[in-house]
Amino acid sequence: MGAVNGNGKATLATVWLGGCSGCHMSLLDLDERLLDLASKMELKASPLTDYKDFPEVDVVLVEGAVANSEHLEHIRTVRERSKILVSFGDCAVTGNVTAMRNAFGVDDVLNTAYRDNSTVIIGIPVGNHIVPGLLERVRPVHEVVKVDYFLPGCPPSADAIFEFVAALIEGREPSLEGRKFG
């Protein structure tokens, strides 16, 4: 993979859609190995950074399922601006826990959360610029955009993440043995 920035390093981003952020916590569990990766790549965007527009990057790790209209719009932009897109963790790969709501309709989910509980809440939030509308069905990332690699796990281990990301940013084919999905 050719680096896109001026310092000869590969560029990386991470994205968090509908999920628990466990995959990002596992990424942080790389501890000092993050310094090894930092010498070879530049982090351009993540939930830990403040970016307004998603940048063009070599590799992006996408955590979480596509659950609302904001996710849907964002994942399409991410795909357009990324050379390699990785479904990062089981929610991105299969929908996992996030997709448990697929057994119910959106109205059932919202009524249970906002009307049928013990707390009185006035009104149900609807899709607007503050609260994005829920999609009828939570979808794994590959149902919305082309995915280049799958890194399953709930969450993937720090060791698996390190080996996988290191291979990608060094331009090597990552070992998918025991981790390939589909």
Image: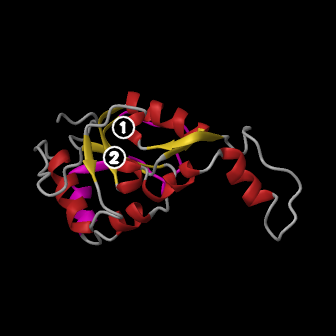
Q: How crowded is mark 1: few (under 14 residues within 10 Å), some or many (20 or more)?
A: some
**Does residue 50 show up magenta in the picture?**
yes
The residue that mark 1 highlights is 142
Q: Residue at x 46, y 31 (%)?
A: 76
**Residue 122 in sight from this viewpoint:** yes
Residue 109, position as x, y percentages in the image: 68, 53
Q: Which residue is drawn at 27% across and 36% down?
A: 6
Q: Quadrant of residue 9?
A: top left
Provide the secondary structure element on which disc 1 rests: helix
Q: Front-most of 107 and 82?
A: 107
| Part of the protein shown in magenta | 33-56
Q: Tell me if label 2 and label 1 are in contact, CB under 8 Å.
A: yes
- Report the front residue among 166 and 130: 130
Q: Residue 87 carries which label?
A: 2
**Residue 179, position in %: x, y?**
19, 55
Q: In this view, does 179 lie to the left or right of 16?
A: left
Q: Nearer the viewer, mark 2 or mark 1?
A: 1
Does the magenta portion include 52? yes
The earlier-in-sequence mark between 2 and 1 is 2
What is the CA distance from the residue labelled 2 to the residue labelled 1? 8 Å
Closer to us: 73 or 179: 179
Residue 106 appears left or right of 71? right
